[in-house]
Image (tube, grey):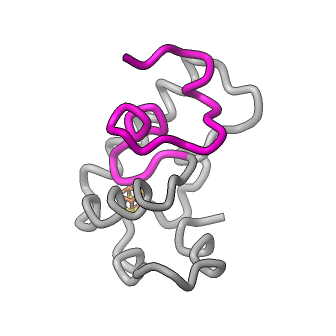
Amino acid sequence: MAIGELFAFREWDDTTWSELAECKGLSAIFFPPAAERPQARERREAQAREVCHSCEVMYECRDFARRNREYGFWGGESEEERHAAGYRLIAPIGVRARVIS
Ligand code: SF4
């Protein structure tokens, strides 16, 4: 499921920026598979980060993910990085296994 498709359920926030998303069709590197190992997560997130850094709506995407407590990699930021920035997930998955200071 692409990020744009996720917005079909959201009527309460502006998502027009997603039309310019560089990640269309690349969901596999933005959302973890079940039981993903830490090394695999690092590799996957490095790929996602590279895509995000070439995306012209990175900051809009990051703000959206922070405000809406999204899971996965958004706006050049992992779940852990969003958590560390003060935008806690309701039920963190990747964060739970590692300590964030
Ligand atoms: S910043 Fe990254 S996750 Fe957000 S729309 Fe762009 S490519 Fe997709």
Tell me residue 43's x, y (percent).
48, 27
Tell me residue 34's x, y (percent).
76, 34
- 34 vs 43, left or right, is right
- 74 vs 37, left or right, is left
Tell me residue 8's x, y (percent).
63, 81
Q: Is residue 66 above or below residue 78?
A: below
Asked if the magenta segment contains residue 24, the reply would be no
Residue that sits furthest to the right in the current view: 34
Q: Is residue 19 above or below residue 29?
A: below
Residue under the point 34% across and 77% down: 17
Quarter of the rendering containing residue 67: bottom left
Q: Is residue 33 above or below residue 23?
A: above
Is the C terminus in the top left, top right, bottom left or bottom right quadrant?
A: top left
Considering the whole magenta stretch, tell me its main secondary structure: loop
Residue numbers of the magenta segment:
72-101
Q: Count the labels in the image.
A: 0
Q: Find ligand 1 in the image and state its quadrant.
A: bottom left
Residue under the point 23% across and 66% down: 56
- 24 vs 82, left or right, is right
Is the N terminus in the top left, top right, bottom left or bottom right quadrant?
A: bottom right
Residue under the point 43% across and 52% down: 74
Asked if the magenta segment contains residue 98, the reply would be yes
Q: Is residue 2 above or below residue 70?
A: below
Foreground pick, 13 / 38: 13
